[in-house]
Image: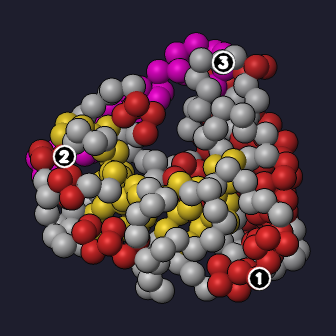
Amino acid sequence: MTQEITVVLPFSGELFGKVKNANLAVQAKESDDLGEVAAAAQSQNKLAAILLSTSKLELPAGLQPRSAPVSLYLETAGRFLDYAVRVNEFAGAPVRFYFPATPGNAVAVRLLSSLGVKAGLDLRGENTDWDAACELLHYDAYGKMPHEPIEPFASAYLQHGSSTYCEAYLERAGKYVHCDEAGNLANSRRELADRVYIGTLDGLSGLDVAAQAAAARKRELSVFMKLEGCSVCPGYKVCARKNPAQKMEACGCKDFMTALLEAAREVNLRKGER
């Protein structure tokens, strides 16, 4: 079972010691040395990814050229002049920079991607600017200028018809489980925060991931019992029902998610014509 899923968990030697031969995605801190994180995670497990929240648009300490993919989460990109001299360094590194969806950050992601730097928007925040995200989506899907694929749009294109854009953030029941500092497991970051546990890390090898994923899917589909909100939204297939408590007319993501679904269709149609 440990070979089929990836455990998203905090950087902790104690947690690492509870499993063997598991795929780990480690949540590190800004003060952590990524070389030490990788060494600890790989002592008896496999390192699939590193996630790091940081305040600086720069490569983290200890990053290795052949490191597992690193996702860096920042609040803002800041001024281009402040990091322009490091763009070539960014472009050659195994990192992707994520920013909250604001107009300024959307412009920064567009600029970085056009310069060969992997970047994306984090659409999970409460203050997501869906208009800014939609503008960036149109640039990524329909623009003519060469650029690096932008997340989470690229994940939505790849998973069109079978999953959502959330896989860019390591969120997909049956493929990822999320672990807290106490070793509790949940199908998603949201369910971990809500204490909807499916097991513990030391019992990972006996966890029925398929059954737990099916139960999570059933909970997701419960919002479609009434003809309102997500159940009548054309973008429901890709949105992961982020706002299930809101009616469609009050849900700010409706237009964006519909546009993302159409973009995924268009991108895959163009691929099929090649």
What residue is shown at x 26% (from left), y 60% (from top)? 4
Tell me which amino acid carries mark 1: Val
Provide the residue designation for mark 3. Answer: 246
Q: Which residue is mark 2?
A: 201
User: In the rendered view of the protein, which quadrant contains the C terminus?
Assistant: bottom right
Mark 1–mark 2 contact, CB under 8 Å? no
In depth, the one of 84 and 228 nearer the eye is 84
Q: Circle 3 — which element?
A: loop
- First in residue order: circle 2 vs circle 3: 2
Tag 2's secondary structure? Answer: helix
| Left or right of residue 74, residue 254 in this image | right
Q: Which residue is mark 1?
A: 85
In this picture, which residue range is highlighted in magenta? 204-230
Quadrant position of the N terminus in the picture: bottom left
Looking at the image, which residue is at 64% across and 15% down?
227
The residue shown at (41%, 63%) is 32
Q: CA distance from mark 1 to mark 3?
A: 44 Å
Marks 2 and 3, how far apart at CA: 34 Å
The image shows residue 201, relative to residue 29, as above or below, that is: above
Q: Write the residue at 65% across / 79% down.
A: 90
Q: Is residue 38 above or below residue 7?
A: below
Q: Position of residue 49 (x, y in %)?
A: 41, 66
Question: SS at mark 1?
Answer: helix
Q: Nearer the viewer, mark 1 or mark 2?
A: 1
Left or right of residue 34, residue 88 in this image: right
- Specify few, some or many for label 3: CA neighbours under 10 Å numbering under 14, 14-19, or 20 or more: some
Three-letter residue code for mark 2: Leu
Q: Is residue 198 left or right of residue 84?
A: left
